[in-house]
Each structure stands twice: as structure tokens, then as C-alpha cells.
Image (spheres, grey):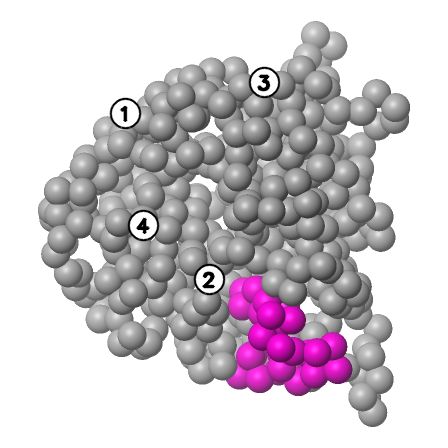
Amino acid sequence: MSPKSVPPTMHRKEGPPPDGLLFGASVDREPEQTDAEGLPVPADNWVAWRQVGRMERTHVAGPEPQPRLGFWERPEEALDRAAEAGCTTFLMPIEWARVHPHPGVSGPDSAVLARYAAVAAACGHRQLEPVVSLHHFTHPGWLGEDFWLRPDAPARVRIWVERVVGALGGSVRHWITLGEVNSLVVRSWLAGTLPPGRTLAFVDASLALDNLLCGHVVSYEAIHAEQPDAEVTMTTGPGRVYEFDGMMADLLVARSEGVCVADLDAWIAQRRVRYDTAFPALGPGERLVRRLGAAWSSYGARGMGRAGRPSRLPRRAIDALYGSPHPRTLDVLGLSLTAPIEWAVGRLRGSGALGATGPVNRPPDLARWLIGRHSLTPGLPIWVVDGAPATDVGRDQALRENVGAVMVATDAQVPVTRFWHRMEAGDAGAYGAVIAGLHRGDRSVLGA
């Protein structure tokens, strides 16, 4: 099935989900706390934004959020709710800033690492498969807001990952190195809604993306050096712009497809055409963003300067990818149900200056995106992380719609093997009803 063939009403087959699909829960990062001296804990790269009140402006308007589960202080509550809902996998975040709050010789806090290791072990006691997210938008504040622009960023990330794998590796075999990479780049250096808050800083965005790709590659190597049987991925959201969606996975699998360094740019240019064919631009805004993405890309035909000379944009990821002992540095295609490009063009689109960019965060568009991404990278299983806030519908309806999109994709033979719903304190009942109904073969629990 092609993305275009998904019907607008999202008709679904009857029957239970495929045997290989596990339903799980994830938790949001913890809210900031303060220590005895009134200093923020963990002291991450968002501290300055919190102090001046910018955090309130980084979220989309929508229903009031439910109380969080308090994962750090009460992890058992989150795990119990997940188990009671019928989940069989749990996605747990590791806060780098909490583990390593200060620079210098003090190093990581061994007690914090031990606590995370105990939580991972507690997952197993509840028949929950632990999956660890190593980085999701935040890092220690002492590394600076521009950490991902620094040439030493990948090396520091590798050290961080090696420490976590050494502490948690006894219980964990499934890892997400970087969460929502495209959203991090778009919102930090193009839309200005995450630290450091730059707007239309295309060169910085290219540099950050290059360092993030390098960071994933060295993280993949570090994990597989200790755990050859591990499954490792990073996640991206439905960006609908090749450079901020499909290109990252293409770069990570290029060597395994027989693409040599000399042919990489031409191959990426061909892949861009395939992506744009699978996902036609939905309006002038999207066409404009796609042109800008291609023009500022470090890779593909636009990634070369005039007369075939390399452009001034960074391309360190090539050395990392082709110097790796692994021809493919991606075991799973990790997809997050978020819409990063909406952040980049939302204000202009709202004013009518750009026209429609298309709905990318509502079914059946999510089903089309899942089917399309699988058609472009057919050799990999897929993990889906449902972390998008419900901006125009209630949380229960958003949950049913997103699970429905996944079911449409699996009906089309898309190999989704993990789905995590970001649970809040009041979500367990609704999610449990959906999981139980699906396993009975009753898809009416997903609504109309």
C-alpha cells in the first residue's frame, strides 16, 4: 500500500494487532525542582529559559495537562500504572543533567545511576521490557546552550552513553540514542522555540544536525561494543521535509545499501526525489520550506558547491558513518508522532503568508506517514513513540486516533513492533481499555 492509498476515513480491518506489536508506556521528563540553596535540579540547558519565563511559551496551546506521574521520585507508581494498563514495554528517560550535574573530576553521580538501574530492573519484575532514552532535548547546563554546535559534542556524548550502558546494561537491551532529532534542530535553530532560541539560523541548524548524526553513530558503536545483540535507534517526527525527516535514516543506512562515499551526494539527491514523490507538498508553505531545506542541506546535490566543490556546510558525519565498523548504524526506524515543521512555519502560516503546510499530526495523515516511511526504508522494523500533545482534541481521543493510525499501518504490512503512549496520571484507564479491546479483536475501542 502506498501513502496515497490510505482512505480519508481510515477504515480498519477487524481482529487483534499483529503478534509482534508491543504496547507500552513512556513518561515525560520531570519538572524542574530546586535544591536546599534554591538552585535548579537538574541543572540542564533549559535553566535560563525557566528563570525568565520562556518555558511557558515553548508549548502549544491546548487542554490543561494532567498531573505528571513523578517518575523520578515515584517510579514504582509509573511502572505499576503501565503494568495495570496491560503494557509490556516501558520507555524510560535518563536525565544526563541529573547524572552529571557538575563539570570536572567529580564525574557522574553513581547514586543516581544506581537508582536508574534499579528502575530498569523493576521493569523486568513487572514483565515490562525496559527501553532507555538517552537524550531528549536536554543536557547538562554546564555544557552550554550551544552544546550541539561544539566540535567535541560527539565525543562527550559517547562518554555519557558508555557510562549509562555500563550501569544499566544488565537489564536493558533496547536503546534510543536521541529523541526527536529533527524537532530539536528545527525548534532550536530555525523556529526559536527551544534553547538556544535561534530563528532561521540555517548554518547553525546544519552544524547541529551534523553533530547529532555523529553523536548517534558513536552512541551506536558504544552500545554495540558492550551489547552486540542490542537494538538501537534514534527517533524523528513527521517533518514532511526530506532534510528533517527521511534524510537522517538514509545517511545511517547508505553504506549497507552499497553506496560509496563518492556516490553519496547523488544517492541522497535521488532519495530526496523519492521522498517528495511519496509525500507531495501540500501547499506553498511546505514547498517553500522544502526548497530552503534542500538549499541549506549538507548532503545531496545541493550539498556541493559550484563546480562540484564541497560547500562550507559541515559534513563530519560522513567520516563517522564510513569510519564506523558497522555498515548500518540503525537497527530500527524510530518515529515520533510529533510535527516539528509546524513549529517552524506556524506563525507565518497562521497569518496566511505561507498558505497551508498540511495537517501532519492527525490521522489518516499519520497512517500515510508511517506507510510512506516504511516504503522508503523497507528493511527495518519500526518503533513509534506517541509523545505529541493533544492540541485540538482531548487526550483520550488523541490516543485512540494515534493507535488507530498505527493499526492502519500494520494492516498495510508495516512492521511496527513497539508503540509507546506518553502516560499522565489519569491515562491508565483509557489506555488499558484500548489495549484490552484490541487484544480481544474489538477495534470499536478506537472510535469511529
- Range shown magenta: 244-273
Distance, label 3 to label 2, CA atoms, is: 33 Å
**Quarter holding the C terminus?**
bottom left
> Of discs 4 and 3, which sits in the foreground?
4
The residue carrying mark 4 is: 20
The residue carrying mark 1 is: 84
> Quick check: 175 above or below 203?
above
Q: Amino acid at mark 2?
A: Leu
> Of discs 4 and 1, which sits in the foreground?
4
Q: Amino acid at mark 3?
A: Arg
- SS for dot 2: loop
Q: Nearer the viewer, residue 129 or 405?
A: 129
Q: Is residue 205 left or right of residue 115?
A: right
Question: What residue occupies the far front of the structure in this picture?
Answer: 228
Q: Is residue 17 visible?
A: yes
The residue carrying mark 2 is: 380
